[in-house]
Amino acid sequence: MQGPGGPQQPFSRIRTPGFAGYNVRWSPFFEHKLAVASAANYGLIGNGRVHVLHLGPGSTPEPGIQVANMFDTQDGLFDVAWSEMHENHLASSSGDGSISLWDISHATPGGAPNTRPIAHWRRHTREVFSLSWSPLQKHLFASSSWDGTLRIWSPEHAGMEVRMLCLSPDGPALPNSASGPNPPPNAPPGANPAQPSPASAPSTTAPCIYTCAFSPHSPDLIATGAGDGYVRIFDLRIPSPSAASTGTGNMAAQPIAILPVMGEVLSLDWNKYVPGTLATGSTDRSVKVWDLRGALQPYASAAPPPQPRIAMPGQGTSMLSTSPPVPHPAAHAYAIRHVAFSPHASHLLASASYDMSARIWDTSGGKGGVSSSLGGVGAATTSALVQRHDAHTEFVAGVEWSLFSPGTIASCAWDSETHIWRAPVR
C-alpha cells in the first residue's frame, strides 16, 4: 500500500491457490476472523469455496494469517455474509442461483473442505451476486441476483423466504433484455469498462441486480444497484400495487427513490454515521457519494407515508434527478468493483477496481477523483485520494474495513490472494 505517489508499505497476505477471490467480510463477533468468497477458474466454470481466515502471530502457511475452515460448493461463489445473530453462521451465494448457510464450528477431519451446509436454498434462477445481512433486523438477510430479483430471507424461521421484489413490473427477469447490459452467464461485470451503459430512463424489464445493502439506520430500507445504471431504494413496509391486488407480496416492487448513476452499478454502501448517505461504484469508473437525507426522511418514522414523496409522472416512483446524469472524474482506470465506508471514520471510503488496485478516499472534500454529491444531487465536489494499495496482480474484487481494529483493511482479488493492510484513520 502507498500514499498518493508514495512507496508500497508492508502488508500481510495469504494465497488460496486455484480460487479467485470475489469478496471478503470481517466477522461481526470475532476480531481475528474473516471470510472470503471465491471461485475456481475466475467464476466462469467450476467449484466455489469459502475460506474462513484467522489472524494471529506465528501461524502458517503465511505469517499472521491461516486458513481455519473451508466450505466447498459445486459452483463458484460470489459473496459471503456473516450472520448478525449467530457468531458461527455465515451465508454464501453461488453462480447456480443457490444460497448456503454454514456453521464454522463444524470442522471436517484432517482439515478437508466441508461440503454439507446446515441449510441450502435455491429460489433464484441465475447467479446470486450479492448478500446483505440486516444490522438492525438481525433475523433477516437479502440476496440479489442476475435474474432481476431481490429476495429477503429469515433463516431463523426454517429458512423461510419473507419477500421477493422484482425490478420488472411484469414478473421474472428477461435474461436477454435489450434495455439493459445484462451479461451472459458467469461473465465478469464491468469487463468492458470503457463502455458505460446509458442511464436515460429506468428499465421496464428486469436488469441484473449486482448489489444490495440494508440501511444501517432505517431497518426497513434497502438499496439495490443494477445493470441498467440505477440505484433503487425500497421500503419493505410498502406493498407493491400487484402485491396488494394478488396478496402474494412478490411482484412489481415500487422503489421510493431512484438514482441515475451511469454505468452498471456494481457496488454500493451506506455511511454508518450519516443517515441517508450512500456511495456507489460503477463501470463508468467513478465513485459517487449521494446525500439522500431529504428524500428518505419521511420513511424514517415507524409508519411510512402512503405514497412516494417525489413521483415521476405516470410511474408512481421517485427519482432524485430527472435530468440526464453528467460525467464524473474517474476514480480508477477501470470499473469500480466494490465500495465500503469505514465503520470508524465517516469521511473515509474504500474502493476496489478491475485496475488491480484498492484505494482509500477522504469524502469530506479536497483534491482527487471521486465525485461527491454530499451537498445534494448535482452539487459535485471532489474528494482526496488518501492511499493506494497496488500489491494485487489481478482484478481486486472485494475490500472491507475491520469492525474491531480501526484502519485495518482486507482486500481479495483474482490473483488468489487476500491482503491485510492498514490505512490512516483521522
Image (cartoon, grey):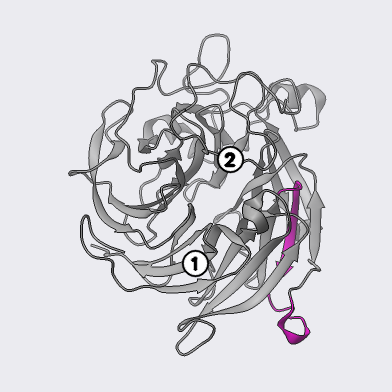
Q: Is label 2 or label 1 in front? A: 1
Q: Which residue is at the front of the view, 130 or 28?
A: 130
Q: Is residue 402 magenta?
A: no
Residue 65 is situated, as x and y percent measured from the top left of the image, at: 50, 79
Pointer 2 local density, CA inside 10 Å: few below 14, some 14–19, many at least 20 = many
**Above or below, 237 relative to 114:** above
Residue 347 visible (yes or no): no
The residue shown at (68%, 64%) is 49
Residues drawn in magenta: 95-112
Q: In the image, what residue type sits under mark 1?
A: Thr
Pointer 1 local density, CA inside 10 Å: few below 14, some 14–19, many at least 20 = many
Q: Quadrant of the N terminus?
A: bottom left
Q: Is residue 107 magenta?
A: yes
Q: Which residue is at the front of the view, 228 or 272?
A: 228
Which quadrant would residue 146 be assigned to in this image?
top right
Q: Quadrant of the C terminus?
A: bottom left
- Report the disc number at residue 418: 1
**Above or below, 327 relative to 360:** above
Indicate left or right for 190 with 144 as reference.
left
Question: How many discs appear?
Answer: 2
Residue 409 is situated, as x and y percent measured from the top left of the image, at: 40, 65
**Above or below, 84 relative to 318:** below
Indicate left or right for 264 with 293 as reference.
right
The residue shown at (70%, 44%) is 127
Disc with the residue nearer the chain's start (2 vs 1): 2
- Report the disc number at residue 210: 2
